[in-house]
Image (tube, rainbow, N blue to C red):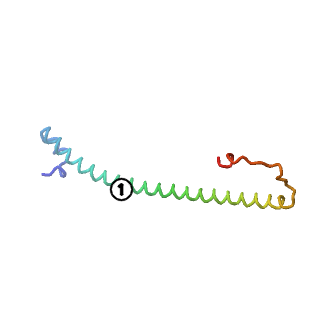
């Protein structure tokens, strides 16, 4: 009689050490199957979550770059004609190179 085919009644009829051993073998076999199943589900879930998060990060990065590019275009289109026409005077304008690097 294998430990996998023992019922609860049969286990209770066995002596304490035999019952404990049979139950232990039965649970270990079940736990291995459950562990494999849990690990496959976890690995699938991790892969799904990682792909979803990385996709969202990629999308946000693209949007951020696009907005930054659009803002630079707007600033250029607004300021360049004013600079060329002399409406904005940069004669007394100074920039500290340390501020730009930061």
- Front residue (pair 35, 9): 35
Q: Is residue 93 left or right of residue 55?
A: right
Q: Is residue 44 above or below residue 92?
A: below
Q: Residue furthest top?
A: 16
Task: Indicate the position of residue 23 as horizontal and vertical percent values.
Answer: 20, 44
Q: Decide if residue 89 is on the left or right side of residue 50.
A: right
Q: Residues within 10 Å of mark 1 (few under 14, many from 20)?
A: few
Image coords of residue 2 (percent x, y): 14, 52
Q: Which residue is at 76% across, 60% downward? A: 76
Q: Quadrant of residue 88?
A: bottom right
Q: Residue at x 43, y 54 (%)?
A: 46
Which of the pair 41/89 is nearer the observer? 89
Expressed as whole percent of the image width and height from the top left, the position of residue 95 reads 74, 48
Count of marks placed on residues? 1
Q: Nearer the viewer, residue 6 or 94?
A: 94
Please give left or right for residue 27 compared with residue 87 in the image: left
According to the picture, the residue beneath numbered tag 1 turns out to be 40
Question: In the displayed structure, does residue 58 sit left or right of residue 33?
Answer: right
**Residue 83: x %, y % from top left:** 83, 58
Q: Secondary structure at mark 1?
A: helix
């Amino acid at each position: 009689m294998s430990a996998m085919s023992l019922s609860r009644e049969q286990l209770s009829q066995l002596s304490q050490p035999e019952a404990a051993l049979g139950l232990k073998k039965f649970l270990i076999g079940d736990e291995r199957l459950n562990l494999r199943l849990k690990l496959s589900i976890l690995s699938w879930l991790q892969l799904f979550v990682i792909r979803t998060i990385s996709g969202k990060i990629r999308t946000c990065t693209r949007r951020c770059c696009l907005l930054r590019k659009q803002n630079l275009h707007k600033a250029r289109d607004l300021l360049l004609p004013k600079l060329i026409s002399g409406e904005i005077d940069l004669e007394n304008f100074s920039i500290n190179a340390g501020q730009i690097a930061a």
